[in-house]
Image: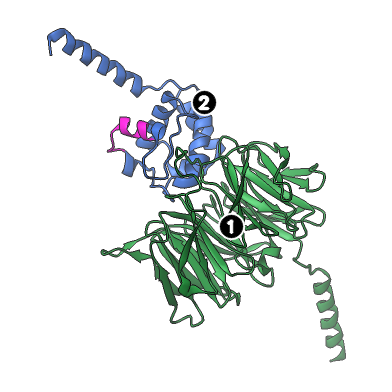
Chain colours: A green, B blue
Amino acid sequence: MIRSILLSAVLLWSHNSSARGTGDLGIVIERADGSVQVIETTTNSSLGRISGLGDLSHASAVYSRDEQFAYIFGRDGGLSKIDIINKKLVKRVLQSGNSIGGAISQDGRLVAVSNYKPGGVKIFDAETLELVADIPATYGTHDQLSKVIGLVDAPGQKFIFSLWDADEIWVADMSNVKKPQIKKFKNIGRNPYDALITPDGRYYIAGLFGEDGMAMLDLWNLDAGVKRILDGYGKGEQKLPVYKMPHLEGWAIAGNFAFVPAVGRHEVLVINTLDWTEAGRIKVHGQPVFVMARPDGRNIWVNFAVPDNDTLQVIDTQSLDIIKTLTPGKGVLHMEFEPRGGQVWASVRDEDRLAIFDTETFEQLITFEAKKPSGIFFTSRAHRIGL
Amino acid sequence: MNKTLLIASLLSTALLFAHNAAAEVDSARQNELLYFIKHDCGSCHGMTLKGGLGPALLPETLSAKPKDYLVSTILEGRKNTAMPPWKTMLSQDDAIWITEQLQNGSMQPTKLAKGRQAEGKQAKGKQ
């Protein structure tokens, strides 16, 4: 008896000694190969690869609250749950024909996916990936289905999303999984293309493709409805072609300023968050795609659509000047900051590598191989609203 | 319309057709265009061209459409949609060649999904 207790204690010990924390881990989407690379940011190395995840173009990910599992949302409608410690695929379901992104609920028990085809949101049990709720994005008189974009989680066990074709924002309260309560806001503006939620979980803001402006919903005052902000920021000027839809995920906020990509214009717009008016515009190198704040808010990093996607620019949030222009290589698709902001990782798709920069000196520290990398997602997202 | 004019117009149509049928795009450019279709068109139409924010670009949906219409959609964009004009980045020949690939299905998702290896073979096949 004593021997067996000792033996199991030894076994337990040896098992634990190989355990590893996950706070410095992350994943990099390898879009063309249907794989993700697991990386760590303490010594900047690759820990392995998980394959067989389908079409990962435009894929994104969220984390379980214990940071052991990531949920990957693929373009082909695939939802994959991966274990980043043991580097294996846990479960994969093909939940629609064509999807665009997802979110995890406040309690960590539900994973929601927004779909283009069939248009709507499907909600899964985070543990088993079993379907628990299906919310078709019906609109119009003939029950048409709208493509759904801009899906985020919000406090109070809510998911919020926008309907590209229907010009609506829906708030789904999932407190009772069996009976989702849905509140719909109509005529919010033409063609919402993406949306974000402020880090405090209070304001949901959808960018409009079909109009110059953004639609804002104050989740603390839902009865006030959707308000238009930055209305007509380009009115009267010639419409410019948009070579890639900008992204609004990753709210860039510094002091009282928020920074968002203009649609089509070579500009980053500055919003005063006290009254939601335009506080300025910053001329940049190309059409901005991601406008992301370093976690301390002192600098904003911006990448661009084709044909300017070889460049990154850094904006100082005090002077609103561009203080650095970097050219990491062709196809800079995404950036992710370390949780405390000392380094930033950038994916350089066309050169099959990741570039890591020091965010103070802008020195490129190292690069390493990744196959057609796109999104980079660190585990610190597990504990942030809306990511 | 008099006879000469008719012949001339027929001839130029034939020439135009002949030109359209064989867009002059060298193999290096073909490789660039395949990459462009997969990753840049793919950002809205899906990397495997099955559709996304934009419609699917598969032979089933495109083969019946007039070629000129597709070429002009690529170069000039479509008003009141998210499709931008690409003429600042693509030439007429580029657009014709892309249209051919899309319509005849040589851009099949399976081939695309195989990545660069398949792209190389594809480009050689067109020479």
**Residue under the point 22% across and 11% down:** B8
Residue A129 appears in view = no
**Residue under the point 38% across and 47% down:** B55
* Both labels 2 and 1 in a single chain: no
Magenta stretch in the rendered image:
B63-73
Q: Which residue is label 2 attached to?
A: B29
Instruction: Please state which amino acid type lies under the numbered disc 1.
Output: Glu
Crowdedness near tag 1: few (<14), some (14–19) or many (≥20) residues, C-alpha within 10 Å: many
Residue A72 appears in view = yes
Would residue A66 appear left or right of A91 to someone viewing this image?
right
Q: Which residue is label 1 attached to?
A: A249
Crowdedness near tag 2: few (<14), some (14–19) or many (≥20) residues, C-alpha within 10 Å: few
Which image quadrant is residue A188 in?
bottom left
> Dots 2 and 1: beta carbons under 8 Å?
no
Q: Would you say residue B66 sits in the magenta stretch? A: yes
Against A157, is A381 above or below? above
Q: Residue lying furthest top in this view?
A: B4
Instruction: Please state which amino acid type lies under the numbered disc 2.
Output: Arg
Q: Main secondary structure of the magenta part?
A: helix
